[in-house]
Amino acid sequence: MFSSSVLTVSHHPQVRRVVTTNSASRRLVGRFIAGDDLDAALGPIRALVQRGLLVTVDHLGDGDRMALDHATAICAAATRVGTTVTLDMEDHTNVDSTLGILAALRREHPWVGAVLQSGLRRTEADAADLAGAGSRVRLVKGAYAEPASVAYTAKADVDEAYLRCLRILMAGQGYPMVATHDLRMVEAARALTVEYGRHADDHEYQMLYGIRTAEQDRIAASGERMRVYLPYGADWYGYFTRRLAERPANLAFFLRSLISR
């Protein structure tokens, strides 16, 4: 209820104008977003690598970059430098098209990763389809306000679905990417790696830039792969409001910064 209310309010033009033009916004925006351009993001990227963390970089912008021709060019460049690409996932209306692009890309680049959202009712079936050998899957809970017809609306149901999807991926032959800040899910993932005989090089944990940094360092220090999802770009508003919607504390901090400017 809190998340959907915040997201609804954030779509109001006057709210967007206040957030994007107010200098006080930058204090909190900088916590979650590494800068407006790649040059600004390089400093945070280097700092994360120096801490022993892996980094995935996301350029925040419109959906044009998801077009197959653009994605193909990005994957070719990734191949040349020896890195990987994971397709991001938007709301439920884009899942089929994104998975279609994934299938096309994997014909030439089988290592291309996918993102699945446990909040969607369809995701267990998608997880089973994508749990094959070599398949990289980033499992998240989901940050969009979705209708009950396609998504679970209660947090407990989303959590239970996350655990079911996580078990499917860990039992499969792919490469699960456990993207969560919920320490209960982290511990459940650890238990499943033991149950299914997994090793540190066949899965990883992921968290967002600016969130649970101490836990990120702890996981990396334990010998596990820990990757930080680092976004940058001038079109940061949608991403930023989803971070505000996730936790009341984030929104309270932001409102205090506006009042005390």
Image: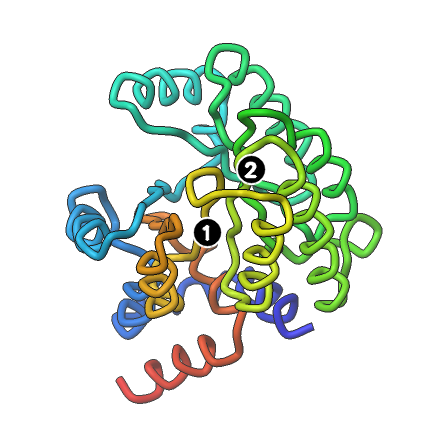
Vertically, is 260 above or below 28? below
Front residue of this view, candidates 72 and 37: 72
Residue at image location 45% in from the left, 55% down from the top: 239
Q: Mark 1 points at which residue?
A: 205
Which dot marks residue 137?
Answer: 2
The three-letter code of the residue at mark 1 reads Tyr
Q: Is residue 41 left or right of residue 128?
A: left
The three-letter code of the residue at mark 2 reads Val
Mark 1 / mark 2, whichever is N-terminal: 2
Q: Quadrant of residue 245?
A: bottom right
- Where disc 2 sits, the SS reads strand
Q: Where is residue 200 in the image (x, y as percent from the top left)?
A: 43, 45
Residue at image location 53% in from the left, 36% down from the top: 175
Vertically, is 197 above or below 27? above
Q: In this view, does 29 lie to the left or right of 205?
A: left
Front residue of this view, candidates 40 and 24: 40
Which dot marks residue 177?
Answer: none
Front residue of this view, candidates 24 and 68: 68
Vertically, is 125 above or below 143? above
Q: Assess disc 2: are there few (<14), some (14-19) or many (≥20) residues with their C-alpha within 10 Å of its C-alpha.
A: many
Report the residue that reaches farthest toward the right. Answer: 149
